[in-house]
Structures are given as structure tokens and as C-alpha cells.
Amino acid sequence: MQVLENLNWRYATKSMNGKPVPQEKVDYILEAVRLSASSSGLQPYEILVITDPEVKERIKPIAWNQSQITDASHVLVFAAWDNYTADRINSVFKYNNEQRELPDSVTDDYREKLINSYTNKTAEENFNHAAKQAYIALGTALVAAAEQKVDSTPMEGFDPAALDEMLDLKSKGLRSTTILPLGYRNEEGDWLVNMKKVRTPKEKFITVV
């Protein structure tokens, strides 16, 4: 029941009060993201943690001037691989096998199947798939933040190309997908803070077949 209580507590915070989030809470959220579900365990994304006030000020104009960017304690940028490549896939499998003390031959068939599948698709198709994986991690971050009673605001309202250029993501083979400011709600300045949480009724939302 605690998870449901936490999810009922959280909302997309519209105004934050600038209070810093303790590092141990941020670390907890990031570890939850690291442990999040991922297709074939590839984790085709990285997280950039923005704390520098000057960088946040530079991000704000390309994020529709949303105040949460600068008023948040930490801003997480979820950046997905711009493409799946044989090198990237091989690197993940090599690391996993080393950690599990397995010979590479154990996973050769599955690894080759993945490589053949992804390398026959366009870079844009592969990026879209990687971006979906990043969104799974975003969902995990939202739940973990709620558990820590840290407010968060998932954002798509920004110029990805401009953010990619600012953070030099292209050189890392990454493209930004979503932003997640972390902080604490401004009780007096957020019109949504005391609103009843409303979601689609179960009878309209869930179909049992």
C-alpha cells in the first residue's frame, strides 16, 4: 500500500521552492534508475545530473522558461543512445558476462540475434526504441522520488536539439529524451498543490480479457 500512497502524494510539481534535496535521496533515486527494467538489459541511455546554477539558467530558455528548471535542486536529463551498434551491444554483453563470470559463448547466439536485428534498422528507428527504454527508467525515477518524498516534474517541453548541443551529447552518441527536475514543492506558489488527484476510473481504464 505504501507505493500507492506515495503515487497518490506525487504530482507534476509546477513550482519548486529551491530547497536542496539531500544527496542520499538523489543517490537513491539514481540507483533506482540504474536498476530499472531495460530491453535485453542493454540500458541504452545515460543520465546527466545538472546542479550548476549557471547551466540550469542556460537550459531554462530552451525549456519554455519553466521555473522548475532553475528552482529545482537537481535536474536529471535522460539521454538515449542515438543508435544501436554492434560495438555498443558487444560491450554490454562483455561486461555482463564478466560480472556473472560466464564465458562469452554462453550469450553468443542471443547477442548476434540482437546485433542482426538492430543493425538492419535505421538509426532513427533505433533511437526511438532507446528513447522508450529511457522512459521506462523515467517511470522508475518518479516512483523512487515519491518514495523519498522528493517532488519531480517530468518534462518533454524543451528543444532537444538545442539541449543536445548545449550538453555536447552528440559527441557521446546520445540524444536527450526527457528532463526531470527534482526538488520540493512551493506550497504557496503552486496552483496545483492542493488539487484533488484525478485519474481515469478503473472501469474505463482496465479491461480484463
Image (cartoon, helix red, strand yellow):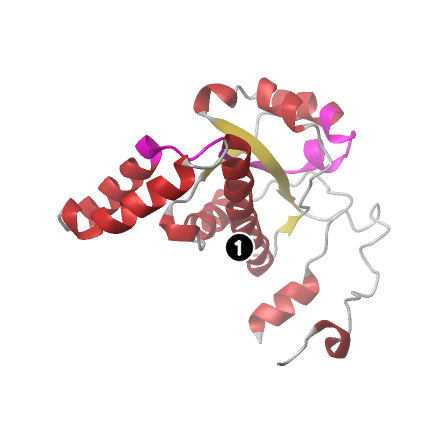
Is 27 drawn above or below residue 48 in the view shown?
Answer: below
Name the residue located 77 percent from the left edge and 43 percent from the top edge. Answer: 15
Quadrant of residue 9 within the rendered picture: bottom right
- The image shows residue 16 at horizontal and vertical percentages of 73, 42
Span shown in magenta: 62-88
Q: Is residue 74 visible?
A: no
Q: Which residue is mark 1?
A: 140
Is 49 drawn above or below residue 114 in the view shown?
Answer: above
Query: Which quadrant is home to the N terminus?
Result: bottom right
Numbered marks: total: 1
- The image shows residue 103 at horizontal and vertical percentages of 13, 48
**Residue 24 included in the magenta stretch of the image:** no
- The image shows residue 126 at horizontal and vertical percentages of 49, 38
**Residue 63 included in the magenta stretch of the image:** yes
Q: Is residue 192 visible?
A: yes
Identified by mark 1, the residue type is Thr
Quick one: 119 or 144, which is closer to the camera? 119
Is 16 drawn above or below residue 160 in the view shown?
Answer: below
Name the residue located 41 percent from the left edge and 40 percent from the top edge. Answer: 118
Quadrant of residue 17 within the rendered picture: top right
Q: Residues within 10 Å of mark 1 (few under 14, many from 20)?
A: many
Q: Is residue 82 left or right of residue 4?
A: left
Name the residue located 50 percent from the left edge and 33 percent from the top edge. Answer: 122
- The image shows residue 53 at horizontal and vertical percentages of 63, 25
Quick one: 83 or 5, which is closer to the camera? 83
Query: Which quadrant is home to the C terminus?
Result: bottom right
Is 199 drawn above or below residue 168 in the view shown?
Answer: below
